[in-house]
């Protein structure tokens, strides 16, 4: 089968969703498919195109499994300007649509959302090739933006909701990551049967338990201290106020250090909030090749979400942490996917989103129980090996493709 994939990130870009799609393409190659990936040039780390990729708006490359068309992301320098971001998404989506339409015959179009604007691009490409359209929903939008307060304009919300419903109606299948997300979308689709639950996978071969004392830890100037780590996007969905407050509570303990590794629209804000806290360190995004080392350096990993976000977003970082065999402290809505994964796997603890005291109490319990943390790490790895392999996830997609081909 010839498959066209339209996605916002792809290797060597370091975005988590790019990692997901990159490995899926490798698995599709194993299953005998040929793939054309339409994506952006790498830009996630700096929020601008990486220097070695600058100079052209479109770059094409051939691969062993097919080919890649990379398009300039038109990313605005001001990350908080919603209008600029919307215009950038729109411009990229138009270019992606053209690259997907004027190409050799495709038997199936697979589109990743967000951004929502990629779905109409995929629909037009699917009409052109007379092929089924599969929409992969990583986060439900505009719900996620509304829940975090980044989107408040009622007119714009109405437009985006119409675009969302249009996308579901024009798709032949809508893939979501969890039963929570599926329940959210049941009232919004014209046919419930088109909803499929296929979780993101984790690469248990490149991510695995290893020694905590490594070069990343030495780069921080640390040895045996307990590192409490948040690694990922620093945006409106992630309430890092919890981490700053926890650091205040532990500021008199020189054996505990908080590390925030990542970037995003709110990093500058949190750097200012933690300016007087000597036990908080900010680190930039690391190359994909250092991810396992980064995860190993952390003794306790944090996965916080704003209240109301747990049922509409499943951060893929949770699966990487489990594969690395590290304990997790999640602050999420009770009963949602992350809460269930953490508690059922035995990989750590989960507290209600927004409950600062419960978060700090649970963190204190983990810090003071290294043996319990080690046991949680073992359970995390066992869960990842049994349930989150790339092969199993790709096979689920392949089954879906076969259904749509009939």
Image (cartoon, grey):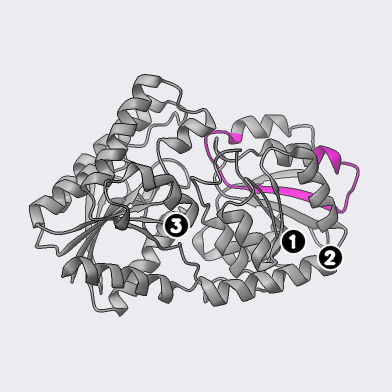
Which comes before the other along the chain, label 2 or label 1? Answer: 1
Which residue, given by chain and number where applicable, does mark 3 sit on?
177
Left or right? Give the position of 345 relative to 114: right
Q: Is residue 376 left or right of residue 204?
A: right
The image position of residue 403, as x and y in percent, is 23, 69
Residue 151: name its quadrant: top left
At mark 1, the secondary structure is loop
User: Is disc 3 surrounded by few (<14), some (14 to 19) or many (20+) residues within 10 Å?
Assistant: many
Magenta segment: does it hold 265?
yes
Using the rendered image of the protein, determine whether residue 57 is visible from the camera's viewpoint.
Answer: no
- Residue 356 located within the stretch drawn in magenta: no
User: Quadrant location of residue 55?
Assistant: top left
Give residue 99's position: percent from left, percent from top.
Answer: 16, 50
Q: Decide which of 338, 289 is in the foreground and name it.
A: 338
Q: Residue shown at 58%/58% (left/top)?
A: 318
Badge 2 element = helix
Q: Earlier in the sequence, mark 3 or mark 1?
A: 3
Identify the residue at horizontal 25%, vertical 72% (top origin): 65
**Separation of disc 3 and disc 2 at Cα?**
32 Å
Label 1: which residue?
A: 299
* Contact check, label 3 and label 2, Cβ < 8 Å: no
What is the magenta range?
247-267
Per the image, the residue denoted by label 2 is 370
- Asked whether the viewer can see residue 44, the reply is yes
Q: Is residue 174 left or right of residue 96?
A: right
**Residue 214, above or below 87:** below
Q: Residues within 10 Å of mark 2 (few under 14, many from 20)?
A: some
Q: Is residue 100 above or below residue 404?
A: above
């Amino acid at each position: 089968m010839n498959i066209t994939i339209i996605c916002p990130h792809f290797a060597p870009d370091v975005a988590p969703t790019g990692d997901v799609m990159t490995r899926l393409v490798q698995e599709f190659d194993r299953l005998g498919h040929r793939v054309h990936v339409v994506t952006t040039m790498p830009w996630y780390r700096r929020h601008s195109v990486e220097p070695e990729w600058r100079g052209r708006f479109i770059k094409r490359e051939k691969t062993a499994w097919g080919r890649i068309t990379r398009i300039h992301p038109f990313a605005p320098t001001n990350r908080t300007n919603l209008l600029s971001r919307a215009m950038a998404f729109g411009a990229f989506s138009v270019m992606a649509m053209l690259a997907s339409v004027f190409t050799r015959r495709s038997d199936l179009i697979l589109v990743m959302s967000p951004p929502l604007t990629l779905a109409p691009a995929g629909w037009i490409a699917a009409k052109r090739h007379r092929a089924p359209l599969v929409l992969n929903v990583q986060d439900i939008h505009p719900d996620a933006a509304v829940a975090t307060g980044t989107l408040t304009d009622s007119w714009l919300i109405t437009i985006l909701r119409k675009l969302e419903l249009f996308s579901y109606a024009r798709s032949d299948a809508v893939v979501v990551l969890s039963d929570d997300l599926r329940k959210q979308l049941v009232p919004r689709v014209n046919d419930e049967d088109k909803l499929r639950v296929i979780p993101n996978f984790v690469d248990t071969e490149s991510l695995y338990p290893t020694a905590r004392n490594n070069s990343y830890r030495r780069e921080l100037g640390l040895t045996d201290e307990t590192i409490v780590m948040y690694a990922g996007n620093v945006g409106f969905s992630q309430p890092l106020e919890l981490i700053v407050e926890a650091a205040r509570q532990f500021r008199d303990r020189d054996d505990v250090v908080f590390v925030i590794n990542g970037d995003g629209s709110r990093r500058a804000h949190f750097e200012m909030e933690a300016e007087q806290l000597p036990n908080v360190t900010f680190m930039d995004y690391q190359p994909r090749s250092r991810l396992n080392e980064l995860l190993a350096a952390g003794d306790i990993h944090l996965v916080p979400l704003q209240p109301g976000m747990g049922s509409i977003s499943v951060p893929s970082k949770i699966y990487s942490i489990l594969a690395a065999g590290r304990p997790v402290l999640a602050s999420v809505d009770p009963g949602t996917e992350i809460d269930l994964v953490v508690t059922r796997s035995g990989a750590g603890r989960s507290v209600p989103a927004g409950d600062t005291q419960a978060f700090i109490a649970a963190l204190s319990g983990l810090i003071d129980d290294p043996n319990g943390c080690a046991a949680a790490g073992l359970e995390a790895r066992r869960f990842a090996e049994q349930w989150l392999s790339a092969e199993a996830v790709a096979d689920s997609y392949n089954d879906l493709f076969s259904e749509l081909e009939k």
